[in-house]
Amino acid sequence: MPKGKRSSPRSRKSDVSPPFFIGGLAVQQCVGGPSVDPFHPKSFIGISDLAELTFCEIQSTISQFAAQQGCHENAALDDMSGGVHEFKHDTRRAGGRTKIEETAAKLIESGNLDWETRRYIGRLLESLELQGVSSERRHFELDDFFVIGCPDGMSEDVVTEFGSSRYPRLKFRAKQIQGNLYAALWAKPLARIIVVGTESNERLDKSTPADATGAERWLRHAWALFSGARVPRPPDYAGKCKRCRFNILNGCPFPREKRVPSVAEMTTIASTSI
Ligand code: SF4
């Protein structure tokens, strides 16, 4: 049974907004309230982890298992404020910008970047790009699962998703999927995707209309992998495993045995990895 699921789930139907549709999927936003049971009786699909599907479906699915506890905690917390956690990216002084750029540059120059360091660099660059921009985290109930997500930025008509990579063109597709899911769930007409190079001046910045059909397809796909209804595909080339946080040292059998882990194995890898 996926983590977070109880054998006799209590209904939360009174704690959600009226339904809307993403393609053929009925979706209700959880809006919390004073009498809300903090337990969410189904598993979560996290939108940021879903975006990893373009890198490796095994990695993305393990990430979903690893994130379950955090998703449940965040959702329970957000229910206390109407189902919404609002935030604003820091506004930094001009001197702060130089310091952030220098810090990121030094880390990149040091080479051999592990997953944590790459994530830290990404956050530094994001904090530069999105200074003063507001956004919010929300969660939604579907028939079989909950979805939780937090766009990097948001305005009246646009959700913004930011990414950074050594290869911005490769990263762009993942960010587009993520941004489109936010646009569909937040009912915004446009998703703006910005991806910058960590080792070049390349910058991709493109807005596309929300695509409900695409959003539905990715949500169904992520759930089929998580629930075990579909077997995740390994990465398209083995080099990806070297820079994966679930690699051979952390338990993924694919690099050594060319074998896709079972749901039970993915759960174990998730519980023992960072
Ligand atoms: S080690 Fe390779 S196959 Fe396993 S999760 Fe990571 S990228 Fe995917």
Image (tube, rainbow, N blue to C red):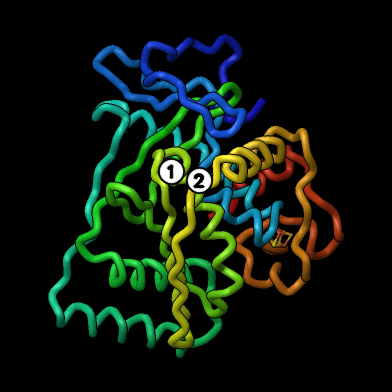
- Residue in view at x 13 percent, y 75 percent: 93
Q: Is residue 247 above or below residue 227?
A: below
Q: Is residue 184 above or below residue 132?
A: above
Question: Do the residues bearing badges 1 and 2 touch, measured as CB atoms within 8 Å?
Answer: yes
Q: What is the quadrant of the N terminus in the image? A: top right
Residue 59: quarter of image = bottom right
User: In the figure, is residue 6 to the left or right of 237?
Assistant: left
The x, y position of residue 228, in whole percent, is 75, 35
Q: Is mark 2 within 8 Å of ligand 1?
A: no
Q: Residues within 10 Å of mark 2 (few under 14, many from 20)?
A: many
Residue 229: quarter of image = top right
Please name the residue that numbered disc 2 is placed on: 181
The x, y position of residue 149, in whole percent, is 43, 43
Does the image show residue 62?
Answer: yes
Secondary structure of the residue carrying tag 2 is: helix
Q: Is residue 82 above or below residue 8?
A: below
- Residue in view at x 39 percent, y 47 percent: 150
Indicate which disc, 1 or 2, sits on the residue closer to the N terminus. 1
- Residue in view at x 33 percent, y 16 percent: 36
User: In the figure, is residue 263 to the left or right of 139?
Assistant: right
User: How much space separates mark 1 and mark 2, taking CA atoms?
Assistant: 9 Å
Q: Is mark 1 within 8 Å of ligand 1?
A: no
Q: Nearer the viewer, mark 1 or mark 2?
A: 2
- Residue in view at x 50 percent, y 50 percent: 180
Please name the residue that numbered disc 1 is placed on: 149
Q: Residues within 10 Å of mark 1 (few under 14, many from 20)?
A: many
Secondary structure of the residue carrying tag 1 is: strand
Observer-nearest of 154 and 236? 154
